[in-house]
Amino acid sequence: MHPQGSEQKRAMLLVRAAEWHAALPIADVVETCRPLPLRPIQGVPAYVRGMTVLRGKSTPVLSLGGLLAGGDARPGRRLVSLRLPEGVVALEVDEVYGVHDIAESQLDGARPLLGGEALDRVSGTAIIDEKLVAWLETGRLVQSDLLDLLFAENLS
């Protein structure tokens, strides 16, 4: 147990995607920007919006709302690009709130209450600024076989 006030906190980027509020590790965030033109990809889940060019590189774009809800993806108003072990992906979100330091002790056990796609992708939940926020670890967001397919799409 940490003495009061000395608990380690993690810097997290808070975003909103559809009805979801989420926290992403700032250490994995490359940048945020406005949406860019997309090239659709056939034969992928509905939350894969397509490919775009970010900083001169072809980058997969995923709808965070669709990814968490397991439904159709609608266009977001901002892109958040994330560094994953396989490469950079961009998440479409509706709003970027900013960076907050969040202690892991703020996580609660509401994760089992989640259903569907979210259960595998959400590490926990926390109440931040009176909002229920899904704590996301970038390594759990997308299955590696789908990422392999998306990054292979760069070559075609």
Image: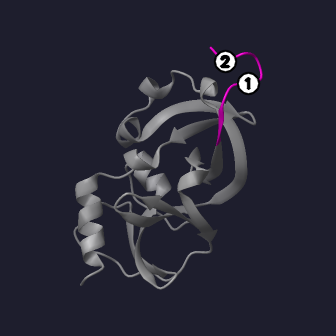
Q: Secondary structure at mark 2?
A: loop
Q: Quadrant of the N terminus?
A: top right
Residue ID at (43%, 65%):
89
Q: Image height check: is 136 above or below 81?
A: above
152 sits to left or right of 100: left
| Amino acid type of the residue that numbered disc 2 sits on in the rendered structure | His
Instruction: List x then y, in percent, for residue 86.
Output: 34, 61
Question: In the image, 133: left or right of 152?
Answer: right
Kindly identify the amino acid type of the residue bearing the numbered disc 1: Ser
Query: Which label sits on residue 6?
Result: 1
Residue 85: x and y in percent read 37, 57
Which quadrant does the C terminus fall into? Answer: bottom left
Segment colored magenta: 1-10
Nearer-the-camera pick, 5 or 59: 5
Residue 92, position as x, y percentages in the image:
52, 64
Res 77 seen here:
no
Give the percent coordinates (x, y) of residue 107: 58, 27
Front residue of 132 and 101: 101
The residue under the point 66% across, 58% down is 95
Q: Is most of the magenta stretch helix, strand or loop?
A: loop
Under circle 1, the secondary element is loop
Q: Residue at x 56, y 75 (%)?
A: 35
Q: Are marks 2 and 1 in contact (CB under 8 Å)?
A: yes
Relative to 67, is 145 on the left or the right?
left
Residue receiving disc 2: 2
